[in-house]
Image (spheres, helix red, strand yellow):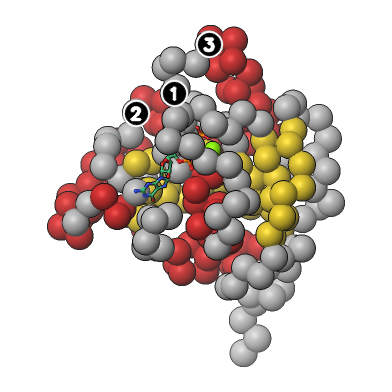
Amino acid sequence: MTIKKSRFVQSLSAFKSFPGQGLPEIAMVGKSNVGKSSLINSMTANSKLARTSAEPGKTRLVNLYLINEAFFLVDLPGYGFAKAPKQEKQKWAEMIEGYLRGSGNLKRVFQLVDLRHAPTEEDQLRVEALRHDELPLTVVATKADKLSKAQRGRCIPVICRTLAVQPWEVMVYSSKDGTGKDALLELVEAEVAPAGENADHT
Ligand SMILES: Nc1nc2c(ncn2[C@@H]2O[C@H](COP(=O)(O)OP(=O)(O)OP(=O)(O)O)[C@@H](O)[C@H]2O)c(=O)[nH]1
Ligand SMILES: [Mg+2]
């Protein structure tokens, strides 16, 4: 799929009624600084769309981006940012949980982890919660550009084991060099196509 149009629509601080017009949504979940906002910019080839930072704790609201006037990419605050004030962390956790549980149009969650590091206990809990809520999930292992091909191969089993996911549920990605972008866009296309469009017509 080609993303031709992308624009910021709204920030939500608490989940009440989602103004999504019934369009499909795909959300980014993961630790602070793992690269959620960068992933949105990379997928849309719009480097100014979502605000990113080398410092963790940049995204503090639920941010909705309308893509091709057809679906939303949803950027969420991160978790696991040890230095953030406790109250703030609590607020972010409520926002993440409230959004994931409250959105009726969520087609898939991209659970981001840093390819270089074993997932944390919080990552494990997140994945368990997504499974429990029966939300389709894909693990996106980010910052692949920081590792060689051989190193990448060694990291995937660690991620699979720690998160109890299968290798085909994990996609390797780099927002820097575009690794994995085509594959992820294909996945997005399959999720957001209007009902029937992917049907086998033979
Ligand atoms: N090398 C490399 N750096 C990346 C990649 N993705 C993100 N980064 C860098 O990682 C840092 C954090 O990126 P963000 O996209 O702001 O991370 P986030 O998950 O949105 O963080 P919060 O909003 O704080 O939760 C920035 O300095 C990015 O440039 C990647 O694929 N490769
Ligand atoms: Mg962010």
Going 76% across and 42% down the picture, which residue do you hit? 10
Q: Nearer the viewer, mark 3 or mark 1?
A: 3
Q: Position of residue 194 (x, y in %)?
A: 73, 68
Q: Quickly name the residue at label 1.
A: 80
Q: Which mark is residue 162?
A: none
Q: Amino acid at mark 1?
A: Gly
Tags 2 and 1 touching, CB below 8 Å: yes
Q: Earlier in the sequence, mark 2 or mark 3?
A: 3
Q: Amino acid at mark 2?
A: Thr
Q: Which mark is residue 85?
A: 3
Determine the secondary structure under disc 1: loop
Disc 2 to disc 3, how far (Cα)? 20 Å
Q: Which mark is residue 120?
A: 2
In which of the image's four quarters is ligand 2 placed?
Answer: top right
Determine the secondary structure under disc 3: loop
- Give the farthest residue toward the left: 150
